Image: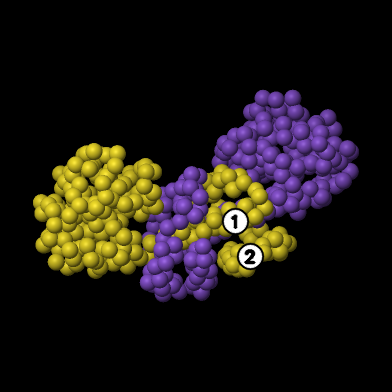
Chain colours: A yellow, B purple
């Protein structure tokens, strides 16, 4: 049984709380949150709103807090020599206060409060300085996911960069296409099945195999017409750069 | 009963052939393809490899051929005053020879041969000059999909432009993130659940609601570090442009 204390109940924290609570072999001992946890009496019961009241009996303390709070909160903890980890994709393991044993427990997914996710499929990237701590984190990761693995801070920062491309930047392309549709009073919903299938295709094909369209087939007539259709300067630049990026391959 | 002849058995044609064959109210009379149709004896039986042998008895002739072949093939057809439509997202209705009644039957999806799709969910954009023809195409569209609607050539070209952003350009971002992962000998598969959830999120949230990440929260430290991590000039420019595009919102 792994005894866990969770610090934070935001996007990541609320999902971790749920999966920890429902997984055999994990005991969620306590959760720190300044706000009341609605709709979950069992969680609310183990909630504390004071860092000073956090139990010193757990095996792992998980900080599911914003990146810029990791350092200060880890310093405020009245714990010593315990295993304290953060859940950030981009923060280094060094950000944590060194009065405790440090580690990382990073679930590679985008979370929205209230939308359930299947943790079994989510890669969990773990890191620790000591081998015993690494084993504890791998064990915890393997209890909730089929894809827990050891990833260094350096590797994690590359993964996080790649994730910005396929998540934040992809979402910005959705936003631009919504702008285009709205401008011509067309319904963005028309594009949703295509959005879904574009992501599904990549589950079985490589990006190279999945590519189609005017840039891929070197169709300059269509590319020129598209650039004429676009009036917004920034949209034009993005179209040009991504078209060139495809053409170069 | 709508009598249909299908010209072409590529990515789009093969999917239309399957759904037409399996839909009550549609009679797939003939299919033109120069190549033998493997694994489907019923389709192979109604196949012809000569345009001159195409029946003149159908209500609709659907050209599922590459954009640059639409004009020449529509001219070669030994038909007159029949309803002949293409399936292209970007070609105008005018590209078709005017010796027949012209139209468009555009299923808004990315198709790969051999991967089944659920046509019920796919928007079908139809267009015709005559109201009677429009009604035939809407009826045909409604038989295979829940989302058939009248879309003009002008509107279709805007939809196609928006589709390039959410399909071709999104796929290029997948490709760049695969490059980043490979460069650091990391497994691209780690990102696949995130790719899927990014697309799923947009089915229920707007792009504005779904956005997260360093640009959204104005986290300049992370943005600068990411730009240092990227060595490729083109990747740097794409990162900068898309970050600015998010920051501006």
As helix, strand or loop, the secondary structure at mark 2 comes to: loop
Which sits in the foreground, B189 or B33? B189
Where residue B134 appears, x then y in whole percent? 77, 37
Where residue B114 appears, x then y in whole percent? 58, 41
Which residue: 34% across, 60% down? A89
Bin the neighbour count of mark 1 within 10 Å (Cα to Cα): few under 14, some 14-19, many 20 and up. Answer: some
Is residue B209 shown left or right of residue B56? left
Q: Quadrant of the N terminus of chain B?
A: top right
Question: On the image, numbered disc 2 is attached to which residue?
Answer: A232
Where residue A132 appears, x then y in whole percent? 15, 57
Which sits in the foreground, A247 or A231? A231
Which residue: 63% across, 59% down? A216
Residue A240 visible somewhere in the drawing: no
Question: On the image, numbered disc 1 is attached to which residue?
Answer: A179
Labelled pair 2, 1 in contact (Cβ < 8 Å): yes
As helix, strand or loop, the secondary structure at mark 1 comes to: helix
């Amino acid at each position: 049984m792994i005894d866990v204390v969770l610090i934070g109940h935001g996007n990541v924290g609320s999902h971790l709380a749920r999966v920890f609570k429902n997984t055999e072999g994990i005991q969620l001992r306590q959760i720190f949150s300044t706000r009341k946890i609605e709709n979950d009496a069992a969680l609310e019961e183990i909630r504390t709103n004071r860092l000073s009241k956090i139990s010193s009996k757990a095996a792992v303390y998980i900080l599911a807090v914003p990146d810029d709070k990791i350092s200060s909160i880890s310093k405020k903890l009245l714990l010593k020599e315990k295993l304290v980890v953060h859940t950030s994709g981009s923060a280094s393991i060094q950000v944590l206060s060194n009065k405790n044993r440090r580690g990382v427990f990073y679930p590679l997914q985008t979370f929205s409060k209230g939308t359930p996710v299947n943790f079994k499929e989510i890669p969990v990237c773990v890191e620790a300085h000591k081998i015993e701590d690494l084993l504890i984190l791998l064990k915890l990761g393997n209890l909730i996911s089929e894809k827990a693995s050891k990833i260094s801070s350096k590797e994690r920062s590359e993964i996080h960069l790649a994730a910005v491309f396929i998540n934040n930047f992809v979402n910005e392309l959705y936003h631009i296409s919504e702008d285009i549709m709205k401008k011509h009073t067309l319904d963005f919903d028309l594009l949703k099945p295509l959005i879904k299938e574009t992501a599904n295709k990549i589950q079985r094909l490589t990006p190279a195999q999945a590519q189609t369209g005017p840039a891929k087939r070197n169709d300059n007539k269509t590319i020129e017409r598209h650039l004429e259709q676009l009036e917004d300067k920034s949209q034009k630049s993005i179209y040009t750069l991504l078209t060139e990026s495809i053409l170069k391959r």
